[in-house]
Image (cartoon, grey):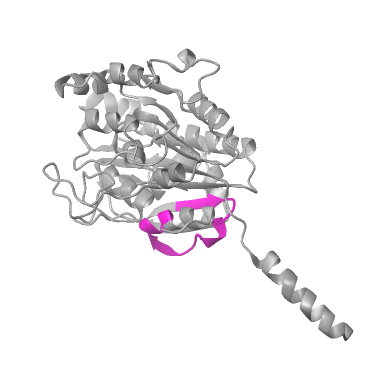
Amino acid sequence: MRRSTRLLILILLVLPLVAAPKRAKNVIILIADAGGIPTLNAASWHGYGAPQKLYVQSWPYLALSDTSPADYTVTDSAAGMTAIVTGVKTLNGVLSMGPDTERGKRDGTILKTLLEYAEERGLSTGVVSNMNITDATPGACYAHANIRSASAQIFAQIFKPRFGDGVDVVLGAGRQSILKAGSKAGLDLAAMAADHKRPMHASLSEVGTNERRPIVVVDKDFDVPAATRLALQLLSQNKSGYFLMVEWDAHTTDPRRGLDAVVGFDKLIREIVSRVNLKETMLLFAADHSFDLRTIGGIKRNEPLLKGLDEWKATHKAGEEIQIPGLRVGRSHTGEEVLATAQGPGAERLRGFIPNTALFDLVLRAYGWKR
């Protein structure tokens, strides 16, 4: 055999191995609820006194994601998150059901979520949120409902999974409201959890050292970084991999609270990257929708972005549109595209102007799975 022929054969054998994209063993979706581009820009100025200083603003793979639902021009969190985790645009107020749903009256097509794909394949799964754990963003991952306000029925689905043994790690807020909703619906959710040997803990500190599938639902002061560390510790024990969704509320109806949250979330994301193996873990940061906040031209670079906020609060009622020298903040969601950015296996596919449903396909392809 001629040397050139042998070389050609060797190249043909090796090329598929070189060209084959790496698959993700783990995926972490990071959702800044209402964290649109205007909010990220303001958070960078607020936290660091300059633009583009957030860690997520340094990631090389990014796209602009349309968030519109199936029925309106502007989405709520239910339709927004449903699109991300199922690849289907649905109606506002609907959780992981199709647009054939009659909101609040009749179920539509049940949509398979990324968490359910992971459960079906034996991966460990988790949801972390400083919001009510039955709220739209976490709820869309593990439950299906024709109306997002069905809190008790959403929580009960933790114990009635469609695939695998259901979501493994559930860490969030909303305890009293969920228990009250359960009582109103005739469901003793705490007893249900106990019956399934998954007690409904009231704090992270109550989780036992040998507990692998904890449920923690607190009343207030939810520690997102501590909860995320716990989730990663538990989920990473599965050699097959894991799926984790972490949400941190970024609504800016109170601009200081909202912008502080974005800065805190960004610091947590930097920490998460230091804790995982990026060769086998995809991280996807996105917002479910944007929010009516605008940085306006009333302050200089060396002045704090929130200059005048305390004075404004002293003379205005809560709920009014906020206008201070550096910011104007309304009360509603807005419809412009949001940032989606990623690191890890498959992140290189994220580019251009995309619908939010494309984020579902991005994650599915990163894992190497098909619909």
Place residue 132 in its image quadrant. Answer: top left
| Place of residue 313 in the rendered image (x, y in percent of width and height, measured from the top left) | 28, 26
- Above or below — where is 315 with respect to 362? above
- Above or below — where is 324 with respect to 347? above
Answer left or right for 233 relative to 256.
Answer: right
Task: Give, as a single range, the part of the protein colored magenta.
Answer: 340-360
Place residue 179 in its image quadrant. Answer: top left
| Place of residue 308 in the rendered image (x, y in percent of width and height, measured from the top left) | 35, 31
Depth check: give the residue in front, 277 or 34.
277
Residue positioned 34% across, 41% down in the render: 162
Depth check: give the residue in front, 141 or 260.
141
Depth check: give the residue in front, 78 or 244.
244
Residue 251, magenta (yes or no): no
| Place of residue 3 in the rendered image (x, y in percent of width and height, measured from the top left) | 88, 83
Answer left or right for 313 relative to 101.
Answer: right
The answer to whether one can see residue 211 in this image is: yes
Count the numbered circles shown.
Answer: 0
The answer to whether one can see residue 219 in this image is: no
Q: In the current view of this chain or complex, which residue is farthest to the bottom?
A: 2
